[in-house]
Amino acid sequence: MRCLLIEDDPSTAKLIEEALTGSGHAVLACSDADSGRAQATQEQWDVIVLDRLLPHSHDGLEILAALRARSDHTPVLVLSALASLDERIRGLRAGGDDYLTKPFALDELLARLEALTRRATRQTESDQLGIADLRLDLRTRKAFRSDKPLALQPREFRLLEYLVRNRGKVVTRSMLLESVWDYRFDPQTNVVDVQISRLRNKVDKDFAPALIQTVRGVGFMLQAPEGATPRA
């Protein structure tokens, strides 16, 4: 896993970094709130270890708030010497996924981080679909291209979801009518072509590469060109 460590105490940071790298994980350590916030909000991480008490009276929860305000759900383990029940509750209610108090055992820290990443992976697999830079959130029924929201109507989302679930495969008009509209095949209707055209305008018009392909005489296919970044 890729871990961002935001910890101002050099000895603690060194111990955590050595434990994580020794277990085969990649770690980037930051020692202050400004660099930690920049890395947390500008890069993608599997998990973040976030100290509460940072230099210049910064509270690590400020960074956590900035992440959650961006709808960034990266798992965050809050690490702190503030061990009271009220402080632990505050850390969790601020958006922390776990809270570990100092002093702590490195084996416990590793186990908690691995549990957080497993949980996040399972949730992503169940709630997210995508291909290249296209992402569908099945829980909120929202779609994004290059992290920009797409204004889809419910039927358009259902159509796009069907295409994404069958990415790389040709789907016929009759398959789409039956699965998305619950219609039997009607050779006189052009509803599929009209909706595909509207969907292209929202999914492909302002982005590259184009993902929705027409297979002449057969149907349609959602496919990313070779080299495009895949998504689960």
Image (cartoon, helix red, strand yellow):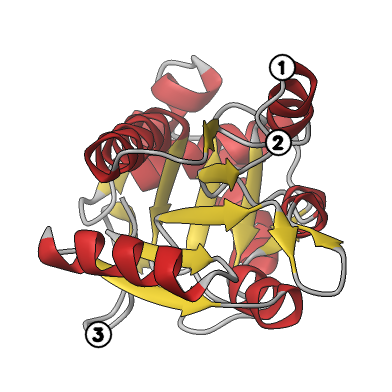
Q: Quadrant of residue 149?
A: bottom right
Q: Quadrant of residue 90?
A: top right
Tell me, for residue 85, which label it has, or none: 1
Residue drawn at x 54%, y 35% as measured from the top left: 101
Which tag is nearer the camera, tag 1 or tag 3?
A: 1
Tell me, for residue 227, which label it has, or none: 3
Q: Establish if 46 lies above or below 184.
A: below
Of callouts 2 and 3, which one flags the residue occurring earlier in the amino acid sequence? 2
Tell me, for residue 65, which label it has, or none: none
Under circle 1, the secondary element is helix
**Could you tell me residue 65's position as x and y percent?**
81, 50
Between the C-alphas of marks 2 and 3, the distance is: 35 Å
Under circle 2, the secondary element is loop
Between the C-alphas of marks 1 and 2, the distance is: 16 Å
Q: Amino acid at mark 3?
A: Gly
Judging by the rendered image, the residue that carries numbered circle 2 is 95
Q: Are marks 2 and 3 in contact (CB under 8 Å)?
A: no
117 vs 175, nearest the viewer: 117
**Could you tell me residue 25's position as x and y percent?**
21, 64
Residue drawn at x 73%, y 57% as measured from the top left: 53
Between the C-alphas of marks 1 and 3, the distance is: 49 Å
Residue drawn at x 69%, y 56% as measured from the top left: 198
Under circle 3, the secondary element is loop
Q: Amino acid at mark 2?
A: Gly
225 vs 67, nearest the viewer: 67
Q: Amino acid at mark 1?
A: Leu
Q: Quadrant of residue 120?
A: top left
21 vs 140, nearest the viewer: 21
